[in-house]
Amino acid sequence: MSLVATVADPLTQPAPPGWEEFVAAYGLLPAWDYQLLRTAAWCSQTASSAVLVRDAASREPVAAFHARHPGTTDPRRFIGPGRVPAVSITECRTAPALGPGVAFAAGLDDRGRAEAVRRFERALGARVGGGGGFIAYRALPERDLAAMPSAGRIRLRLSPRMVLHNQWPDLEAYLAALPGKWRNRLRRVRQAVVADGTRAELTRTIEPADACWLSETVNSRYRPRAVPRPPWPAGYFERLNQLPGTRFVTYRSPAGQLLAFVAMYDTGVELVAGAWGNRSETDGGRRHLYFDLYLRQVEWLLSTGRERLVLGCGMTEIKSRYRARPEPTWGVVGLR
């Protein structure tokens, strides 16, 4: 198979021809929506690239890539301690959410995937120079490892994605499958949410400015102080409101103030949790909404009949209490 690659700067250039059709055809998550990539690029501290790889004969897209170009950085951030000089590095990942920056067409075999990755890396030369520097692939599922070049590269096992598989007819059956102590705690949390008048809803849209503020409240709590990062812009949530399959689990006070939310993406096969925001208690927030929120997501999973709920990385101990199980994710880093 002969492949060709087209590179675009989401900040200043239109999407490579066929990009949006590829995203729609394979039900890719909203992080691949080109308008969202552009909105993120406007508020990013680094340049980025969108690369579409196509079959040279049929012109059909076979793979899409998104990469960030932080410039010169210390590779110990990716490969651990050691006396290594600062170098140019490219991160293959989606932005602003940390997800794999690689998407392959269904049916593309391992050989075709590996060739698509080679074409992608060559295409980056148009933006960051033809040789030298590091490239890092982040949050890769295990099935994509075979496509990654191995010569001179290091593979790192990263924090797993936590996934809950749908195997219960309704919420009561799900709760019955949980340990008694944890089940009783979740029931008390639900009772407390109802008792203070908090309204929980599954909605199609959310107020962009409020969502931006609440997500930054959470992000700043866990972000290392040494890694400053702009907040997600309100325009990001404006675009999410327009995308089919996107819903929001929201919590509001009796007066209608947004207290917490999580963005949810329905791919037709699975539900995927996205941006999360929570008002602090000093700003009028409520305790325990974080725990009730997972239960609301499980409710939606059971009502839709989707195969599984992807809760993402981090908080593995808490998510495991909800019967979510880990799926390995990997990083690959080395000279480009």
Image: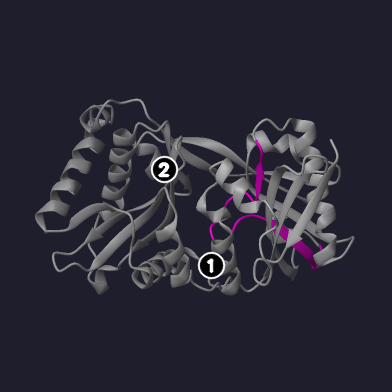
Q: Is residue 103 magenta?
A: yes
Task: Please name the residue shown 47% across and 72% down the image.
Answer: 233
Residue 210 in picture, x, y percent from top left = 34, 70
The reply, left or right, for residue 286 in relation to residue 231 is left
Residue type at mark 2? Answer: Glu
Q: Which residues are magenta?
A: 84-105
Q: Position of residue 150 (x, y in %)?
A: 81, 40
> Can I make out residue 28 in this image?
yes
Mark 2 vs 1, N-terminal side: 1
Q: Residue at x 13, y 64 (%)?
A: 254
Q: Is residue 1 above or below residue 87?
A: above
Dot 2 and dot 1 residues touching (CB under 8 Å): no
The residue that appears at 26% across and 66% down in the rendered structure is: 258
- Which residue is labeled 2 in the image? 317
Res. 73 image quadrant = bottom right
Above-or-below relation of 208 to 307: below
Q: Nearer the viewer, residue 91 or 235?
A: 235
Determine if residue 75 is in view.
no
Q: Is residue 113 left or right of residue 197?
A: right
* Residue corresponding to mark 1: 224
Q: Is residue 287 magenta?
A: no
Q: Which quadrant of the figure has residue 7?
A: bottom right
**Residue 128 sits above or below residue 170 on the image:** below
Would residue 51 appear left or right of 151 to someone viewing this image?
Answer: left
